[in-house]
Image: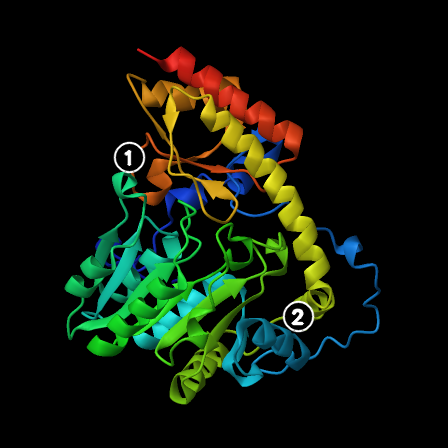
């Protein structure tokens, strides 16, 4: 009996999803055991389950509330200034971004995205067939969002405006006035404003309100991965006040994965009940590590930067006559030090994202020193 024919492979020019360099070359794919100084991570140091100090043996592993654990949603709502019913838990911020994009966008819709940006904010709209218009953040302008330029870019075809604050990878922060202006622009053209706020708790220049609390046209996204250092929980959330949109997002979530993990939700709830204590601890550590990076940059001749206003990352660039390929070869292979090169963000490789929240102080200092050594050796 003849075997049935194999299905045709998808045409490569019609593939909706493609792996990004930031994922292919990530530390977890490269191998943590091959890296001595890991300055490529964009989150606070990974937490451990034992830090909770509580047992979870009696937790019933059932389907959870489709919106997410009510007690956890109440905590998140209280912090955001919205109602618990305006909060929906998701599988990380990446899951939240996918739900928003797949729910709102069709092929041919227009999306305005601040650039550079996290891959999912660009790749999911692209996979859907949306037209992406990049609102470029320039080094020479302090990586600020030009609200007048944003207003001039939108049209009646604009379905989504996508911003990030504190911004990944530059660390710039949108003020409350800038968030309100962005919401006004969205309202005027009939678009939705999507704001990725995964670093919101780590602003150095004051913490503006959640975007979703400012306008019913605004959608806020966040997670436990960056500020809290709990990426292994895979728990994020969407904040949205529009009743029809909330129902649409819930329908999308139910079709993708019904509910989020009750185990992740339980751990997150127990952790965030003591969130003020955890955040004080985290901010104390971050302030020390940021001071180390500022001192490093003050002594630099081979690097220049826009000093970040929040988060745990900086986005400096190499200056002068430096062989960039030689620099990364030396940094990775000889000095065992990993950063996020500019091409992870479709930027010139002279840029690099340095994550200072994840490594311990000694590892951070050693890694920064290795950047200096590699730059010196790669200088023409």
Nearest the eye: 91 or 69: 69
Nearest the eye: 16 or 333: 333
Using the image, determine if residue 369 lies above or below residue 2: above
Nearest the eye: 300 or 62: 300
Q: Is residue 341 visible?
A: yes
Question: Residue at left 51%, top 17%?
Answer: 334
Nearest the eye: 314 or 118: 314
Question: Residue at left 53%, top 34%?
Answer: 39
Secondary structure of residue under mark 2: helix
User: Where in the figure is residue 364, as x and y percent of width and height?
Assistant: 59, 30
How would you rate the neighbour count of disc 2 (Cα within 10 Å): few for under 14, some for 14-19, many for 20 or more?
many
Q: Is residue 1 visible?
A: no
Tally of marks:
2
Using the image, determine if residue 370 lies above or below residue 247: above
User: Where in the figure is residue 212, as x and y percent of width and height?
Assistant: 43, 74
Question: Residue at left 66%, top 70%?
Answer: 265
Separation (CA) of disc 1 from disc 2: 39 Å
Q: Which residue is mark 2?
A: 265
How would you rate the neighbour count of disc 1 (Cα within 10 Å): few for under 14, some for 14-19, many for 20 or more?
few
Task: Please identify the residue farthest to the bottom as the structure is shown.
Answer: 243
Q: Which residue is mark 1?
A: 348
User: Where in the figure is residue 256, as x and y percent of width and height?
Assistant: 48, 74
């Amino acid at each position: 009996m003849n075997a049935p024919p194999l299905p045709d492979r998808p045409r490569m020019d019609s593939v909706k999803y493609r792996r990004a360099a930031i994922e292919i070359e990530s530390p977890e794919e490269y191998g943590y055991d091959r890296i001595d100084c890991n300055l490529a991570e964009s989150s606070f140091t990974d937490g451990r389950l034992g830090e909770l100090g509580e047992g979870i043996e009696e937790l019933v592993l059932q389907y959870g509330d489709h919106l997410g654990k009510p007690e956890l949603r109440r905590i998140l709502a209280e912090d955001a200034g919205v109602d618990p019913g305006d909060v929906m838990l998701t599988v990380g911020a990446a899951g939240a971004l996918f739900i928003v994009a797949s729910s709102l966008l069709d092929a041919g819709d227009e999306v305005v995205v601040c650039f550079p940006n996290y891959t999912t904010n660009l790749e999911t709209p692209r996979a859907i067939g949306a037209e992406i218009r990049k609102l470029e953040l320039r080094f020479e302008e302090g990586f600020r969002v030009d609200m007048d330029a944003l207003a001039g870019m939108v049209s009646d075809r604009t379905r989504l405006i996508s911003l990030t604050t504190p911004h990944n990878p530059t660390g710039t922060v949108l003020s409350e006035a800038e968030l309100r202006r962005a919401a006004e622009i969205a309202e005027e053209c009939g678009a939705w404003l999507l704001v990725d706020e995964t670093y919101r708790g780590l602003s150095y220049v004051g913490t503006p309100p959640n975007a979703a609390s400012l306008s019913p046209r605004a959608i806020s996204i966040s997670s436990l991965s960056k500020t809290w250092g709990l990426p292994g929980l895979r728990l994020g959330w969407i904040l949205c006040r529009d009743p029809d949109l909330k129902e649409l997002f819930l329908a999308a979530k139910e079709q993708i994965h019904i509910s989020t993990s009750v185990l992740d939700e339980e751990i997150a709830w127990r952790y965030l009940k003591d969130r003020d204590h955890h955040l004080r601890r985290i901010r104390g550590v971050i302030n020390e590590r940021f001071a180390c990076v500022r001192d490093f940059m003050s002594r630099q001749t081979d690097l220049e930067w826009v000093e970040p206003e929040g988060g745990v990352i900086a986005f400096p660039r190499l200056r002068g006559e430096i062989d960039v390929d030689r620099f990364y070869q030396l940094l990775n292979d000889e000095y065992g030090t990993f950063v996020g090169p500019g091409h992870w963000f479709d930027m010139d490789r002279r840029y690099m994202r340095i994550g200072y929240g994840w490594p311990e102080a000694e590892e951070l200092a050693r890694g920064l020193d290795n950047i200096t050594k590699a730059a010196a050796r790669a200088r023409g």
